[in-house]
Image (cartoon, rainbow, N blue to C red):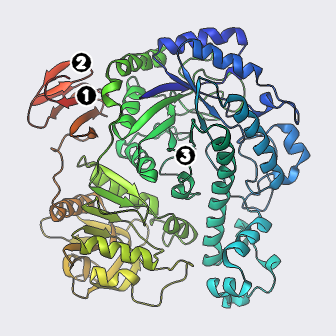
Amino acid sequence: MLYFGVDYYPEHWPEERWPEDARLMAEAGFNVVRLAEFAWSRMEPEEGRYDLGWLDRAIAGLAEQGMKVVLGTPTASPPPWLMTQHPEAFLVRSSGQRVTYGNRRNYSPTDQAYREHSARIVETMARHYADHPAVIGWQIDNEFGDRDYDAPAFRRWLKERFGTLDAINERWGTAFWSHVYTDWDQIPVPLSTGGVPNPGLALDFFRFCSDAYVEYQRLQIDILRKHCPEHFITHNFMGFRYELIDYFDLSADLDFVSWDNYPRGFWNIAAEVEPSTMALGHDTMRGLKGINFWVMEQQAGAGGWDVVSVMPKPGELRLWAYQAIAHGADGIVFFRWRTARHGTEQYWHGLLEHDGRPGRRYHEIKRMGQEIARVGQKIEGSSVKARVALVLSYDARFALQIQPHNPGFSYPEQFQALYHALHARNLAVDVVAPNADLSRYDLVVVPSLYVLTPETAEHLERFVEAGGTLLVTPRTGVKDDANAVVERPLPGLLARLCGVIVEDYDSLPAGKSNTLEYPGVEGAAGSAWCDILTPRGAEVVAHYGEDHYAGQAAITMNAFGRGKALYLGTLGNDALNEALVARLLELAGLEAAPRQAAGIEVSERWLGDIALVFVLNHTESEQAVTLAAGVHHDLLADRQVEGRVRLAPRELLILQAGEPT
């Protein structure tokens, strides 16, 4: 089933308003509503006294209108009485100070008292709603969260993971600066006030912070699995850009991933919407478990706490929601139903205005609801098929947060740039973990695999040896699992696979780039970082054009088994990345969809051998779109189309090959 719904906070509004809200939701075509993820104080107004009657009545009203319910566990926002009783449960910031009450997600995920209270409220809800016919699933907490600089909990994690201080001292190389630890209580956390930390300590601390949320989530999941085995369990992630938790680990215990998609900025009122940025968020969330996902919070209006962001333009809400479906979303839930009159999010606009009126945004989504009612069954059960993968390493990402190398060297920006070049060719892309099964892919791109284990190196070798095409980029293979620099020429464990060594490197000043001599490519250049390469069996694809290393190798290609491994030594500009993607597709034997005008996105979902082709016009003007050969059925307009069609601004097509079925 394709779920289409909204996030609702009945506790914010008079109960006599609830029936009107439910009626308008049903009229908009919604079939699911998320409730209760911030209602702990309403459900447990004082310790041990529970009141779920109001929530029962709210659910009943929605169910009468034919809607199902996803319940959020309310642990992201504890009630005042709990935190007054347990001030030690507040999260510790990187400054070393505990936060105070007044916001959300202000708890320590490792605090034992907080965990006990969390378990009790989740158990109470689970028992109460286990057999409720309208409840279909659960969202754990909300948008896990900030790093907790809790030194005792970090030390406990280290003891469990590494066992002895001797192992810690060896792992982190604590002989440097005379930091050899002789007692567990001597081990610090990398506070922002302490200068540049030991890289090994800092990476293990970031891993601990990630594991703390995984473990806290598992506490809640175990309770829900026990009492509600028929319900699905998810969590609302925050897309590709969030980089404080290993999302592969966090997703492992869930039935599927959800995420919160706000394309037109949060507080950045100048933000422009880049389609490939949204697409990368969707593909990352789909890749975490390799299955379809939900958008649990899809932007419904301008965002804003103290500053109000740009209001979505007419058609954008619908377009963004369909883009999510095109990339594998099986559920679209808009945030929020009605704009709040009170609290921090007074200017985080919903589908209804502050006064409860259904205006332009509501009617735009109502149109989409009518469309989903017609075509949803044709989309149901379909999925994205990709032959290209981008490898996302949270260890590399964490380590490059600790030592970013150069102000212009950004792991997420590099990842986005490479994805953008693939997206421009309308290629389906899976974002996968370093240890993911690569056998289904023809092309694998691995940005800056800075922390590299022998297992991953062997995994990549097997992929290329079996006939795959691989691209790796600068600062690959620099560190081992302990975040220590390897004792071998770079790219370390991948030097044999790439047939090259990094002879030297250059960290470029801001605003400076180095041109590349790449035959047949105009304007190719690299910035921020230049690995100067010496082939050891590889052929040179491109040379640097400037500075003392002019004429030396910048890109190489090595035959390995039945495949090819390319090494890109710099952060490429658009011209370089586009040329490189074209070369990679040729080597991998992949055909891209017909090139379209900039801003036209083409994405496919497959149901067996039947393709559903989504064509989205993200531009402000009418565009001509060239369709693949043959006759196509336009599902939204119920018409036959072929050849070239005109597509209005912020409009879309959903096409199925052949006659209507």
The answer to whether one can see residue 620 in this image is yes
Expressed as whole percent of the image width and height from the top left, the position of residue 430 reads 35, 53
| Apparent side of residue 353 relative to residue 111 in the rendered image (left or right) | left
Residue plotted at (21% across, 87% down): 537
Taking the spot 20% from the left edge, 30% from the top edge, the residue there is 656
Question: For the residue labelled by badge 2, is the local secondary structure a helix, a strand or a loop?
Answer: loop
Mark 3 surroundings: few (<14), some (14-19) or many (≥20) residues within 10 A = many
Q: Are marks 2 and 1 in contact (CB under 8 Å)?
A: yes
Q: Which mark is residue 402?
A: none
Question: Which residue is tagged 2?
Answer: 637
Specify the quadrant that holds the N terminus: top left
Q: Quadrant of the C terminus?
A: top left
Mark 3 — residue?
A: 237
Q: Residue 340, position in %: x, y?
A: 66, 23
According to the image, label 1 marks what residue?
A: 653
Decide which of 563, 570 is in the foreground and name it: 563
Residue drawn at (61%, 24%) of the image: 8
